Amino acid sequence: MKICIFGAGYVGLVAAACFAESGNSVIAVDVDQAKIEGLKQGIIPIYEPGLKEMVLRNQAEGRLSFTTEMTEAVQASLVCFIAVGTPPGEDGSADLKYVLGVARSIGQAMNGFKIIVDKSTVPVGTADKVRVAVQEELVTRCVSLEFDVVSNPEFLKEGAAIDDFMKPDRVVIGTDNVRTSEIMKELYDPFMRKQNLMIVMDIRSAEMTKYAANAMLATRISFMNQIAGLCERMGADVAAVREGIGSDSRIGYDFLFPGPGYGGSCFPKDVKALIKTAEECSYDFLLLKAVEEVNELQKEVLANKLIKVLSSPDEEKPLTGRIVACWGLSFKPSTDDMREAPSLTIIERLLEAGAKVRAHDPEAIQEAKKYFGDRIEYSHNQYDILDGADALAIITDWSEYRNPDFDRIKTALRSPTVVDGRNLYKPARMKAAGFSYIPLGRNGQGIKGDHV
């Protein structure tokens, strides 16, 4: 099948590579000339395991190409995916200017029947706006061409996007056109070999499904972070609580790990957008407002613990003269994405408190420099940043942090203090090894008064 995908960002590039991998002819379109030239030369603008190899392979075999020429791409394709950004506006609503801009470009270029697919995360009702934008361009051109608009939300996890696309747990297709649904089923059939969870529904329900899914996962995260805070005060162990509730088949274990708060390009933006959508319908989404508030507070917890344990008499700058080593900058492992990352809030708080901050991350150092510049130190070696530091803070649960050289950590630190925002280690083991170990919600070892 001949496909074009507008937007060579995270979603668009992964989709383009995976569709090409299954034998389709795919053109990825982007207005960023430098990005397109880089992709033509095999330079991948994001870090995602397995993506570079897939892009290079399909380029070499002639199934995947990159261009800034929108007209040629549209006219050569049956299915046109819109996978551009929908950044949040000041009021939290999704900004649709890029989506609607692409829709108008398609209307200006199309030369026959086209299926226009919203792959971007968009509010309920966006497909109607896309349809109007395309039709207005056709009227301006004084032509009558048939087209259909489909909602096809993505459910990719950064760090596992290739597997998620190639072996999806479900594919949601929003359309009321039988012919279109059959074409979309044919397109996704190669990915449905192990299980056929192709869910066809009306467009508005498909648009809502994406937001509802991310809002549910964000809710589970905030819920467990609140449970961790309560465990600290009650002398309970959040790890045991998670095991106890996760064994209930109605609940399960996923997204029930306490941590420094959720981040990334999806959860924060989508929660805000759904709250705003509800407000536009005069509906007060109290639960999601609480989820968002809890998450913002949670990003302060690790910094508060460090300030408490390392505090000096200087009330204005309580960490003056202190050095904090941070492991992890990206919002989650296996990505370099730092959008809304908890590390941004944590490190800013530490700097404001007068601390000197050193940081390591396997992939996100270049991204971090865009936010912090030379205000913090960076190292590509996780142990180099420990020498003479007053504490180690675990922010992101990269695999290389899970079983480190504890003797080397203890020797390098000025004081053997570890504040673990991911609960990677066993408290008993850390205590036996002589560490002052401060996790989240484990056996009352948290510091009272640092969690709201």
Image (cartoon, rainbow, N blue to C red):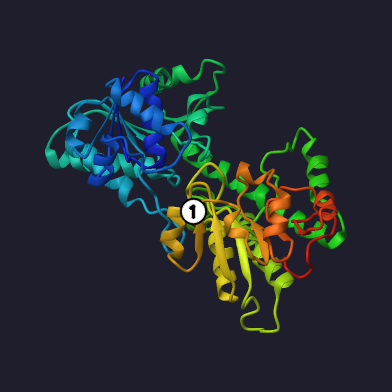
| Whether residue 292 is visible | no
Q: Position of residue 362 (x, y in %)?
A: 52, 47
Q: Which residue, given by chain and number where applicable, does mark 1 sit on?
A: 338
Quadrant where the image shows the N terminus:
top left
Residue 141, placed above or below residue 17: below
Q: Residue at the spot x=85%, y=53% of the render?
A: 432
Q: Position of residue 127 (x, y in %)?
A: 37, 40
Q: Residue at the spot x=66%, y=84% of the render?
A: 314
Q: Secondary structure at mark 1?
A: loop
Residue placed furthest toward the top:
193
| Whether residue 217 is visible | yes
Amino acid residing under circle 1? Met
179 vs 271, left or right, is: left
Q: Residue at the spot x=61%, y=80% of the render?
A: 317
Residue in front for this viewpoint, 71 or 66: 66
Q: Position of residue 407 (x, y in %)?
A: 73, 51
